[in-house]
Amino acid sequence: MGIENGCSRIREVSSLLRICRILPLLPLFALLGGCQMVLLGPSGDVALQQRNLLLASTALMLLVIVPVMALTIFFAWRYRASAKASYDPDWNHSLPLEVVIWSVPLLIIIVIGAMTWMGTHLLDPYRPLDRISAGKPAVEAKAGGNGVRKEPLVIQVVALDWKWLFLYPAQGIASLNEVVAPVDQPIEFRITSSSVMNSLFIPALAGQIYAMPGMQTKLNAVINHAGEFEGFSANYSGAGFSDMRFRFRGVDDKAFGDWVQGAIRNGSTLGREEYLVLEKPSEREPVRYFRDIPSDLFSAVLNMCVDRAKMCARDMMALDAKGGGGKEGIHIVAQLEYDKSVRRGGQPMPPRPFVTAICTPTDVYGTAGVSARVAN
């Protein structure tokens, strides 16, 4: 009997020694995460707050996961077949244990829910920045208690197939596959797409946000450290998606001014006609700069009417809101408006105009259309 117990102990010690030989190799698994840890070491305050929220949520969840995994190993070892552990088949309840089992996860869920709710509102990409970095508000204090908010740098973004166009309306320039911004300068991205859905993502700066044709999304962010960072599309959009990448450069104010002047001197003209050529699908486009940008180019891209032969989406929607292009569409608006206010307890609405005819080259006054008057 003693020999059997001795052999059992030897086997257990041998198993532990094999496990100990594997432990030094565990840090090597960190290499499986890739060479870049930009999400855990961002350079922009918005991305930094998102990182902190992620780490805090993970740490709170580990408060349950780690004890459960440790206790799983402990019970398996404590109550193994060869162990002489106490056995109580009639045990069925423990009030302290029940309190711990239910209260700890509940508290963690409440804390994570509160953190997520606050983070969702404070880190809303449409929300103007309240701070440049920790301890540095966006409003710079002045004597007398008044503050001056530094105006954000507006960058209009167009996702093309398969490249990125960045328009700087205040500077009158544009760049292809490169975006430059001053350090500690609030940035307001206004984002759209020319054809299909894409997703603008600069991991060092902020989270991703979608670019959709005919729609405008926004992203407010700031870069706090000078350097060159990677940006790309995080939404598959066709054959050239893999190379749909660009550079984001954070520079000081002087370097940004020099970059703008260089684009003005060396850039080529980008009007509507040039944009329609640039819009055609292409891959691996080099960085290029443009000047003489029409002030309404981004609006035309957004409304899908860069080609002047097409009706702008905003004009089409305004036309539809007035009943469409003739008497056939009047009933659509009339049914939506008729007696609506009265049924909701309000006063009758005043008459509103409807489109009953559209002029043509041969009928400049639209006299061929049928006029109609809708009574309210």
Image (cartoon, grey):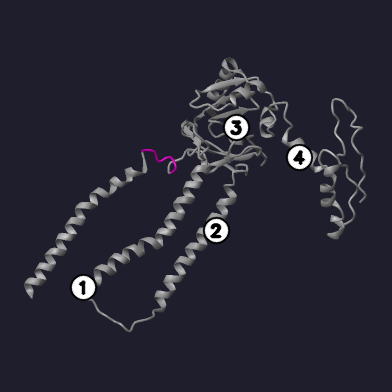
Which of discs 2 and 4 lies nearer the camera? The answer is 4
At 43% from the left edge and 44% from the top edge, which residue is drawn? 40
| Secondary structure found at label 2 | helix
Q: Which range is magenta?
A: 35-39
Q: Specify few, some or many for label 1: CA neighbours under 10 Å numbering under 14, 14-19, or 20 or more.
A: few
The residue pinned by badge 3 equals 158
For marks 1 and 3, give the CA distance. Answer: 66 Å
The disc at residue 317 is 4
Front position in the image: 181 or 298: 298
| Secondary structure found at label 4 | helix
Q: Is 188 rendered above or below residue 258?
A: below
Give percent across and percent down for residue 38: 43, 40
Front position in the image: 44 or 109: 109
Q: Specify few, some or many for label 3: CA neighbours under 10 Å numbering under 14, 14-19, or 20 or more.
A: many
For marks 2 and 1, give the CA distance. Answer: 45 Å
Which of discs 2 and 3 lies nearer the camera? The answer is 3
The residue pinned by badge 1 equals 81
For marks 2 and 3, give the CA distance. Answer: 35 Å
Residue 37 in magenta?
yes
Q: Amino acid at mark 4?
A: Met
The disc at residue 119 is none
For marks 4 and 3, give the CA distance. Answer: 22 Å
Q: Amino acid at mark 1?
A: Ala
Q: Is residue 93 visible?
A: yes
Q: Amino acid at mark 3?
A: Val
Secondary structure mostly taken by the magenta-highlighted segment of the chain = loop
Tell me which label, 2 or 4, sits earlier in the chain: 2
**Rendered image quadrant of residue 215:** top right
Which of discs 4 and 3 lies nearer the camera? The answer is 4
